[in-house]
Image: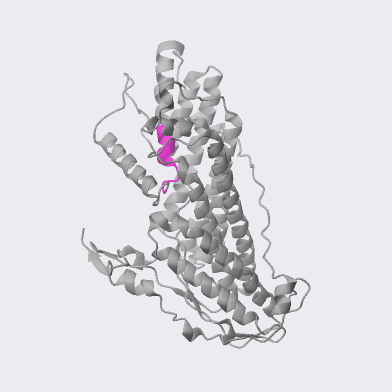
Amino acid sequence: MPYPFVLPTTSSFSFSSCFSCESHPSLPLNASTRRGVVREDLKAFKRTPREHQGAKLPNVVSSLTAYLPYLFAVDAGLSQRAVNGEEIAVILKTAPAIEWRPTLSDSAAVAVPGKEPARVKVHSLEYEVFFVLSCLANAHTLQARIALHPLYVLSTAPVGTQQRQVAVSAATKSLLDAASIYDYLALRAEGLTSGYGMAPPCADISPAALRAQCSLAMAEATLLAVLKDDPYPAVVAQDRNKNDTEWMYKAPDIPKVRAHLFARLCLAASEHAAQAYSLCAGLGRTGGGGKVNESFLRYLDNLRRTSRAKACRFFGIDSELGGQTGTAIAWLNAGLQELGVEKNLSDAGGKKSGGFGRLKEKWTEKREDKKVEKGLDWGADAGRLEETRVYEMLWEKWSKQNDTIMTQVVPPSGPLLQQMPMGREIHTLKPFQPPQLDPQTLEAMRAPPDRSDDATLYPSSDEDDIMGNSIGAFPGTQGDYRTGTPNYY
């Protein structure tokens, strides 16, 4: 939670080499300058170790946000549209050639360790808009991950309730901003494909992938609305945190939740995730820029399963609150089936089962905890492991309660799944408004440029190709791009 996107990189490009503006002669130069800052910030972000990239992310978001008004101004000038009531006359001198490195597209180069996917060359300013906006949306998603990261760290004391709500609110805002951008791009890409018959250069900016990413952001934002008031993941994390001392004087506080409402919200998230998976899974069969990578597809499927499992858990909680412990355990059985986990989490004595399966599970848990501590690709299973831990706690509690007090019959879970209601939406997607240059900036650009806009001043070859692919391009090797020395360990 949320998906750990990788930000793309791009080549240098001079707007003055392909565009001229009679009404605002300085517009191409200013657009090139802003784009150069974006390129340098993306390169700096990529070269930073993954555990320290969070400090560079605000620079990326800031430079992308500053570049967009100039990019949309050039786009409006080509389409003869006014910007803040002012006409801009942009003339295309030659077709642009801009390179971007896709990060979601399935590529054979990714199968080689240390080898990056090849860049794609676009010859339309429309696809430049798509790449820049999708990069900004991905950056918003990464900001949501940074906001949520303290909730999962076990090396410090657990965060308080107020701090938890602030973090979830900030992450939700970032995800909704990303969803608005994806929705805008999907509508624009669908119009471009149907109206002009233009095929996207890669899967990253295909209409199906953009629509899928919009659904993904909505699913994650919906689950955050549940996480904000769901006490069970926090109780499980508190029990695993060695730095927690609250248990010495106070039992974990598990307030009653609006279980039925939360279940329907989780079902809505599952529907969004299922739609995203269906759109991306069909890319390879329908063309449209190729396929997306398997890790992204696997995340979408895990998110769908985890969301349905959460819904089953809340239906079980609702049943347990009503005194129907047998039905609650049946809901747990249904949720475990969705998660793909064995039903018998514990034996008759209440102890967790052993064997190789449990050993493998512990190894997976430790590996995920290390990813959280280092700030790497944690949550790549879409919260499946976290939800399994909650199920283990409830299974042990309810099974013991039913065996000693209630002694109710556990009904089959199949009929319960057939009675599940439709999902309920909680967020409304606000339309994305393309930023525009203010009148003062437009007036200042009527002056001729004060310097030349020469692309040769900024080499188009990416230094990361040299440092990242020459070392570590073979199995078993991994190089250090800062020192240029290989590492065989």
Tell me if residue 364 comes above or below residue 240 in the rendering.
below
Position above or below: 359 against 404: below
- Look at 31% across and 38% down and name the residue there: 361
* Location of residue 348 by image quarter: top left
**What are the residue bounds of the magenta stretch?**
380-390
Residue 256: give x, y in percent of width and height: 56, 24
**Residue 201 appears in the picture as rendered:** no
Q: How many marks?
A: 0
Furthest-front residue in view?
Answer: 450
For the rendered model, the colour scheme is one colour
Is residue 268 rendered to the left or right of residue 3? Answer: right
Q: Is residue 140 above or below residue 259?
A: below
Residue 309 shows in the view: yes
> Is residue 381 within the magenta segment?
yes
In this rendering, the answer to whether 72 lies above or below 423 is below
Front-most of residues 278 and 436: 436
The residue furthest right is 85
- Residue 281 is situated, as x and y percent measured from the top left of the image, at 47, 56
Provide the major secondary structure of the magenta segment.
helix
Q: State the residue lying farthest toward the left.
A: 488
Depth check: 154 or 391 in front?
154
Residue 82, image quadrant: bottom right
Report whether 443 appears left or right of 321: right
Q: Where is residue 90 drawn, in percent x and y? A: 68, 83
Query: Residue visible at 57% across and 28% down?
Result: 257
Q: Please say whether residue 433 is one of the residues in the magenta stretch.
A: no
User: In screen coordinates, is 117 left or right of 14?
Assistant: left
Please identify the quadrant where the C terminus is shown: bottom left
Provide residue 221's location: percent of width, then percent of height. Answer: 57, 46
